[in-house]
Each structure stands twice: as structure tokens, then as C-alpha cells.
Image: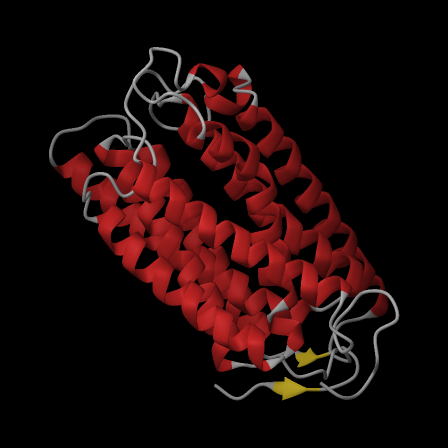
Amino acid sequence: MRRNDGPAIATIAPRVHWAIRLACVVNGAFYFVLGLGLYVKAPWAVALWPWPDVGMSYVFLASIAAAIGAPSIWIGLTGEFAAFAGIGLNTLVVNIGAAIYFAVRMLRSEAGLAPAISVCIAFAVAGALLCVWAQRLPVRDPRPMPAIVRIAFVGFMVTLLVAGSALAFQVPRIFPWNLSPQSSTIFGLIFLGAATYFAHGILYPRWAFAAGQLWSFFSYNLVLFVPYFGMLFSDSSSQGAFDDYGGGADSINVLSLTIYLTVLTVSTLLALYMFFVHPLTRIIGKRSTGD
């Protein structure tokens, strides 16, 4: 589908425009609070997850909440509503997959999943509508996506597709810690949704369709760096290997953890370079033209 590029959003009334921007900031703040609740395993936040899980899984969910909140706030601050297209696509993929997974489990006589299915369907519909709406909006920021970002997005997309598919089909030992089968599938769907988010940026190589992904990945990384490095340098054979994060005494998959930390480090360095060094995209002192 062809995008419409333009310097301003002419199809949205000014009051509605500012109301949406405020809602984006509020929504992002909500997800940051949710992420904090999940990180510290607050009872109200943990209760939102449909089954009991180990502590490190809640830390991972906290990173996902931060990854959702960051681009929402960025869109609110910049007014780049066209960037919602990739977010809507991400939301659609994750929730369609989750609804199908829960429905299959319910057909196998597992009770209590109807509310989760309903919520997933509602989010999937909202994601589809958001994608269609945003796809029709002009792009405010005309800057091209730098080649280094597009190349990195291809790498991220492929990594997420491979890991997400393996997790969705419950291949063991993909994560640094042992996952329950149901968490493995949902986490895999989250990765597959993120892959479509990066794919959207690859297909539409504008900085407007890269900045949100980088803010998302950067926030995700910040949540995970400390616990992941803590796991890397812990004694995986000891009873207390996961005590700081409530993960239990399962052994740590060092290879998976090392690969994960490598991806986190590369994506963090890329985000820092693009936001603070690259002359075209840096936040302070950026140039309006040139790559």
C-alpha cells in the first residue's frame, strides 16, 4: 500500500490532534507503570498474567511493557501518527496468534480462557483499525531512514522470526531460563509481532518508521540489561542463581543468554548512535538534510 508523505497532518482537526498526542503520552506512562509493577512483581500486575510464572518471566514482560510505552510517548511528543501503522500491525499479529492459541486450549477442555480470548480479539481488531487509519495519514518527518538502520532492521527481523517461531512451537531452551509451554508460545508470538514491526520499517524506509522501533528496543534493553548480566555472572548450579529475580533454581542457558546480550548490546549502541551522534537523526543539533 502506498504511503502519503507530507509535512503536516491535514486530515485531523487541531483539537483532536492534540487530544490524541496527550492520550499517547498517558498511554505510554501507563505501560511504564505496568512495567514497573511487573518488574517488582506487584500483586496487581502479576494478577494480569493468565497463569503463575517464574520471576524472570515477569521481568521479561516488564521489558515488553516498556517497549510498548516508549514509542507511544515518542508519537505523543512528535505527533507522528503515521508511525502507528507498524504498531497496529504488531498488535494485530500478536493478538490474533494469542486468540487462536487460547481457543485451541479451550477446545481441549481448559476452562477460564474465554475472557483472555475476548481481550485478544478486541486488541487484534483495534490493531487492524489503527494500522489502516495510520496508513492513510501523511508522514510528518521527511527524513530517509539511514542505510545502517535498515540493514540492522533486517537482522533484527530475521532474529525475531527465527527465535519467535521456535518459541511459538515450544522448542525448549531458546530463552536463558526454562519457560512453561504456554509462556513459550506467547513470548514467541510477541517476538513475531515485533518482527512485523521491524518489517514495516524496512518496507517504508523513513526515519519516522525507525525512531519508534529504536526507542522501543532501547527501553526493552534497559529493563533487561541488569538482570541478564546478573544471570550471566551468577552460579547457575546454586540454589540462589535466580533469587534476585525470583526465577527458581533452574540452570541458566549461557549460550542463549550470551546471544541475547549480544543483540541487546548491538541494538542499544545503534540507538545511542542514531539518537545522539548521527548528523541526520540526532536529537540535538541535527541537520535537516544529508545522510
Q: Position of residue 230 (x, y in %)?
A: 49, 28
In this rendering, would 9 be left or right of 152? right
Query: Looking at the figure, which quarter contains the C terminus?
Result: bottom right
At x 52%, y 15%, the residue is 43
Vertical side of 142 occupied by 165: above or below: above
In this view, the residue in front, 209 or 155, is 155
Asked if residue 251 lies left or right of residue 230, the reply is left
Lateral position of residue 32 relative to residue 45, left or right = right
The percent coordinates of residue 45 (x first, y second) are 53, 24
Say if 124 sits above or below 3 in the image. Answer: above
Q: Is residue 98 positioned above or below 272 on the image?
A: above
Farthest residue, direction right: 285
* Residue 2 visible (yes or no): yes
Can residue 16 be seen in the rendering of this structure?
A: no
Query: Could you say where residue 235 lies in the image, as x and y percent from the top left?
Result: 38, 20
The number of numbered badges drawn on the structure is 0
Relative side of 5 to 162, left or right: right
Q: Within the image, what quadrant is residue 179 found in?
A: top left
Q: Nearer the viewer, residue 27 or 211?
A: 211
Q: Residue 185: where, in percent of width, then height? A: 27, 43
Residue at point 85%, 68% (across, down): 14
For image coordinates 73% across by 44% down, the residue present is: 26
Residue at horizontal 61%, vertical 58%?
269
Report the front residue among 190 and 79: 190
